[in-house]
Image (cartoon, rainbow, N blue to C red):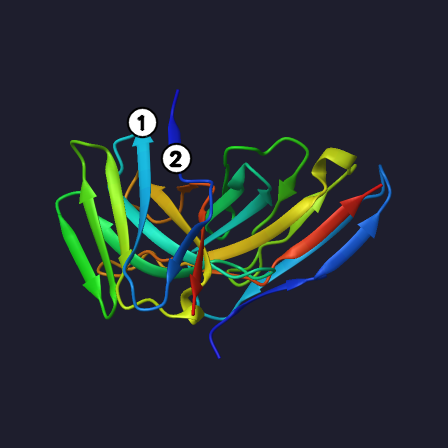
Amino acid sequence: SQKIEQNSEALNIQEGKTATLTCNYTNYSPAYLQWYRQDPGRGPVFLLLIRENEKEKRKERLKVTFDTTLKQSLFHITASQPADSATYLCALDLTGGGNKLTFGTGTQLKVEL
Amino acid sequence: EAQVTQNPRYLITVTGKKLTVTCSQNMNHEYMSWYRQDPGLGLRQIYYSMNVEVTDKGDVPEGYKVSRKEKRNFPLILESPSPNQTSLYFCASSSRLAGRNNEQFFGPGTRLTVL
C-alpha cells in the first residue's frame, strides 16, 4: 500500500540549533514534493517545492533535500527560532499538475529558548 | 489581498440536515480542492476541480458533493451529514500556469461538528 510517513512525535530543539524533519514514502513516484507549515487552527502555508530531478532546494533558513532512491525528503531549518514552532507537513504531487496532493500527517516542531 | 475564504468558520449541525460550506478565491486560480483534516490521518483530499464545470473525486469523496459553476467559487455540499463527517475542512486553490510552484493556497478552515 502507499504510505507517507512523518515522525508523529514532536521534535523539541533549542533555539539556534538546526531542526531536521523527515518525510518518507513508499510505493509512490512523485513528480514534486512540497513542504507546508501549519499553525494551530489555521490552514497550511506553502514553504518549498522540490522536483524529482532536484537534489536540494534552499530558501533563506530553509533547506529541502529529495532522494528518490531512498524515497525520502529532509526538511532543515537552520538557526531555529521560537517563531518556527509549528507543524510541518510534506505533500507529494504525483502528477506534477499541482491539483492533487497527498499529505503526510505532519511533525510538530517546538523551538525552546 | 490574495486569499481563499471559507464560510462558515464554525458549524454545529445535526445528522441529516443538508449543509453547504462555501469557498471563494480571488487569485483567478484554475485549480481548487477540498480537504478534511482529522487527528492521526492528516489532510485528505475530498474533491478537486481543474476548472469551471470540471470536478473529480479525491481520496475520500463519499458523502460529499461539489460544484464549480464559477471560477472563483467551489462550494462543498453535505446532503445528509453524519457524525463521521465531523472534521476540520480546508479549501485550497492553485494556479496551473507553467513555471509556478503549484503551491496550494489554503483557506482558514471550517470546523464542522455533526451531532
Q: Nearer the viewer, residue B52 or A86?
A: A86
Q: Chain of mark 2?
A: A
Q: Position of residue B52 (x, y in %)?
A: 49, 53
Does A64 sit above or below residue A26? below
Q: Image point 46% across, 40% down: which residue?
A: A8
Q: Is residue A22 left or right of residue B7?
A: left
Horizontal arrangement in the rendering, residue A76 relative to residue B85 (left or right): left
Q: Which residue is mark 2?
A: A5
Q: Residue at x 30, y 29 (%)?
A: A28
Residue B46 screen position, x and y as percent:
55, 40
Q: Which of the numbered marks, if any, corresponds to residue B8?
A: none
- Picture quadrant where residue A2 is located: top left
Could you say which quadrant of the image residue A85 lies in? bottom left
Asked if the residue under mark 2 is in contact with the one under mark 1, i.e. CB atoms within 8 Å, the reply is: yes
Task: State the CA–CA distance, disc 1 to disc 2.
Answer: 9 Å
The type of residue carrying mark 2 is Glu
Assign the C terminus of chain B to one quadrant of the image.
top right
What residue is rendered at 72% in x and 42% in y? Answer: B86
Q: Which residue is mark 1?
A: A26
Q: Nearer the viewer, residue B91 or B55?
A: B91
Q: Comparing marks 1 and 2, which lies closer to the viewer? A: 2
Q: In x, y percent, where is residue B105?
A: 45, 61
Q: Secondary structure at mark 1?
A: strand
The reply to whether residue B104 is in sight is no
Dot placed on the residue nearer the N-terminal end, 1 or 2: 2
Look at label 1 and name its amino acid. Thr
